[in-house]
Image (cartoon, rainbow, N blue to C red):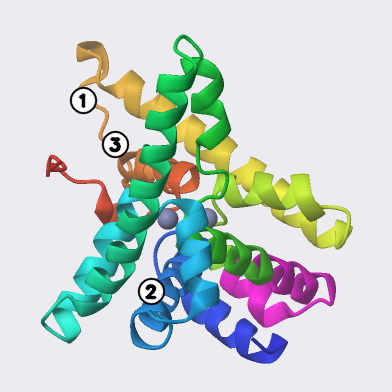
């Protein structure tokens, strides 16, 4: 995606709750599955990728099904993709059966040899998109894009997974921007930690007359967003179902 367009989408995402990079990764996953269902169900290259990964991770399997059922009705794409996966799996399991018969007692060796080496194709595309977004973000900050900087400062911040991932993989590329985001994240964490300490203190019966400030009430949510990237409203009383 062109740099300018990425920045427009990034600024939009920064104005919404949660980590903007996580949000754009989520959109990239939707696009990847959409593409897969509508254009590439029969594309040999895509099929090879899906096969070598042994299918999708649980979250993206659910996304695949949800997108197809919500748009077209019959699950033809899912049938096409998984028929091919089942064919491949049968072949793999038959090979394992033969290997078991030939050399009993070598189970551990065989397990490591045949495990799918490649991660879920949608996860791969998501991570790639996330790194591209982070790279554009850091480049724009490095070039002193004050509009984006302002949007970032008003936002919930960049989650720790993305900040650490960026620093580990590419933190030397835009050093001033990386330092700026790192310092800002440290400040946010320090501030929220102090607020959480006040929250904890005021739960004590002895200090019950002291009201919590709005910041102290919400600090834990801000921290969970930094740890997970998810918007604060995702943290509620609903127990997740299996
Ligand atoms: Zn994130
Ligand atoms: Zn996945």
**Contact? badges 1 and 3 (CB < 8 Å):** no
Location of residue 222 in the rendering, given as x and y in whole percent from the top left corner: 42, 47
Q: CA distance from mark 1 to mark 2?
A: 53 Å
Element assignment for label 2: helix
Q: Residue at x 75, y 80 (%)?
A: 145
User: Which of the numbered marks, if any, corresponds to residue 212?
Assistant: 3
The magenta-colored residue range is 134-152
The residue singled out by tag 2 in the image is 33
Quadrant of residue 238 in the image? top left
- Classify mark 1 as within 8 Å of ligand 1 or not, answering yes or no: no
Q: CA distance from mark 1 to mark 3?
A: 10 Å
Q: Is residue 171 magenta?
A: no
Secondary structure predominantly adopted by residues drawn in magenta: helix
Tell me if mark 2 has few (under 14), some (14-19) or many (20+) residues whose alpha carbon lies within 10 angstroms of its own.
many
Location of residue 37 in the rendering, given as x and y in whole percent from the top left corner: 34, 80
Location of residue 197 in the rendering, given as x and y in whole percent from the top left corner: 43, 24
Q: For this rendering, which residue is in front, 62 or 7?
A: 62
Decide: is 201 above or below 137.
above
Tell me if mark 3 has few (under 14), some (14-19) or many (20+) residues whose alpha carbon lies within 10 angstroms of its own.
some
């Amino acid at each position: 995606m062109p740099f300018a367009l990425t920045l427009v989408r990034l600024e939009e995402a920064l104005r919404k709750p949660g980590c903007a990079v996580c949000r754009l990764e989520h959109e990239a996953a939707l696009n990847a599955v959409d593409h897969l269902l509508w254009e590439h169900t029969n594309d040999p290259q895509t099929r090879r990728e899906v096969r070598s990964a042994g299918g999708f991770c649980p979250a993206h399997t659910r996304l695949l099904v949800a997108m197809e059922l919500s748009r077209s009705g019959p699950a033809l794409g899912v049938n096409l993709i998984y028929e091919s996966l089942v064919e491949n799996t049968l072949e793999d399991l038959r090979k394992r059966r033969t290997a078991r018969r030939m050399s009993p007692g070598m189970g551990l060796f065989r397990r490591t040899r045949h495990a799918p080496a490649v991660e879920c194709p949608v996860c791969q595309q998501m991570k790639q998109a996330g790194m591209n977004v982070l790279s554009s973000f850091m480049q724009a900050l490095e070039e002193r894009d004050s509009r984006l900087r302002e949007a970032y400062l008003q936002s919930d911040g960049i989650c720790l997974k993305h900040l650490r991932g960026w620093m580990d993989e590419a933190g030397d590329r835009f050093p001033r921007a990386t330092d700026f985001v790192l310092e800002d994240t440290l400040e946010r964490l320090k501030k929220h930690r102090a607020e959480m300490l006040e929250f904890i203190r005021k739960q004590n019966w002895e200090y019950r007359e002291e009201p919590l400030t709005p910041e102290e009430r919400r600090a834990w949510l801000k921290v969970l967003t930094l740890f997970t990237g998810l918007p604060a409203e995702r943290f509620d009383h609903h127990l997740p179902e299996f």
